[in-house]
């Protein structure tokens, strides 16, 4: 985005108008953008790598720590997996805060696993499609900004729940669909529909949902 467009965006934002710009050259559908080959290619793009190691992403991870603290969740001595771990930076942030017993990153794209192994080698990494069941269980399962990319999110969500040990937690974030305009997203939840989605698919488990900021929703499900 050039400086003129950024200036226009800032001016309009000051008078209450929030706009987003869409790249005209992007002709792929959301389904095509989320295919395995496309994801592997994307994680080979230096611009994407820089975006996922930027200050704003680090601030989101620190925001996750703040949410855990607000809910008195201590991961010390716990087994943790980050589903859709990307570059592994969330696992790195969690491991710096808590004395985690084991940490695992799961990714759909092998190229992302290669990056994560280099950026945070303390974790174990596995390639797996969350649309399929995973046999192992963990004390804490994290899945941040992933479900919006998945065609069948109910199935993926149930697979995530199956990965949580009894007494453990599932922590999920998704963009706020009222403000999300990214062409690669398939699902767009409002705060209300997000709460309904979690309630209808959690089999009566205790949970909490909330809007963290204008552009992010989270859920914690207690098993």
Image (cartoon, helix red, strand yellow):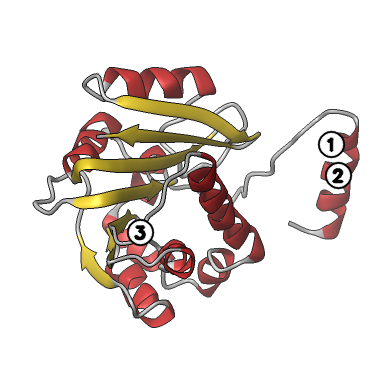
Q: To which quarter of the image does residue 116 belong?
A: bottom left
Name, please, the residue furthest toward the left: 135
Q: Position of residue 199 (x, y in %)?
A: 33, 19
Q: Secondary structure at mark 2?
A: helix
Label 1, label 3: how many angstroms apart (C-alpha)?
33 Å
Examine the rendered structure and indicate whether residue 121 appears above or below residue 189.
below
Whether label 1 touches label 2, CB < 8 Å: yes
Q: Which residue is mark 1?
A: 13
Quadrant of the rendered structure where residue 100 is? bottom left
Q: Nearer the viewer, mark 3 or mark 2?
A: 2
Q: Which mark is residue 38?
A: 3
Residue drawn 62% across the image and 32% down it: 179
Residue at point 27%, 69% (across, down): 110
In this rendering, the answer to whether 46 lies above or below 180 is below
Quadrant (top left/top right/bottom left/bottom right) for the N terminus: bottom right
Vertical placement of residue 22 versus 106, above or below: above
Foreground residue among 161 and 2: 161
What SS does tag 3 mark? helix
SS type, badge 1: helix
Q: Earlier in the sequence, mark 3 or mark 2?
A: 2
Residue underneath mark 2 = 10
Give the left or right position of residue 67, taking residue 160 as reference.
right
Q: Is residue 17 above or below residue 133?
A: above
């Amino acid at each position: 985005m050039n400086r003129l467009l950024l200036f226009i965006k800032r001016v309009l934002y000051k008078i209450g108008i929030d706009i987003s710009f869409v790249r005209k050259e992007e002709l792929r559908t959301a389904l095509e953008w989320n295919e395995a080959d496309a994801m592997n290619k994307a994680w080979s793009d230096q611009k994407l790598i820089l975006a996922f190691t930027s200050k704003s992403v680090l601030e989101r991870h620190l925001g996750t720590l703040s949410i855990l603290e607000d809910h008195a969740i201590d991961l010390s001595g716990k087994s943790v997996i980050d589903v859709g771990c990307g570059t592994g930076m969330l696992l790195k942030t969690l491991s710096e805060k808590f004395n985690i017993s084991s940490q695992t990153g799961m990714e759909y794209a092998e190229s992302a696993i290669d990056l994560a192994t280099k950026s945070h080698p303390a974790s174990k990494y596995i390639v797996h499609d969350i649309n399929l069941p995973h046999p192992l269980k963990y004390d804490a399962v994290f899945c941040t900004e992933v479900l919006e990319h998945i065609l069948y999110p109910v199935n993926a969500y149930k697979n995530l729940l199956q990965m949580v040990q009894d007494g453990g937690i599932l922590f999920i974030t998704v963009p706020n669909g009222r403000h999300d305009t990214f062409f690669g997203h398939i699902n767009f939840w409002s705060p209300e529909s997000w709460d309904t989605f979690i309630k209808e698919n959690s089999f009566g488990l205790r949970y909490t949902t909330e809007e963290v900021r204008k552009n992010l929703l989270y859920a914690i499900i207690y098993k």
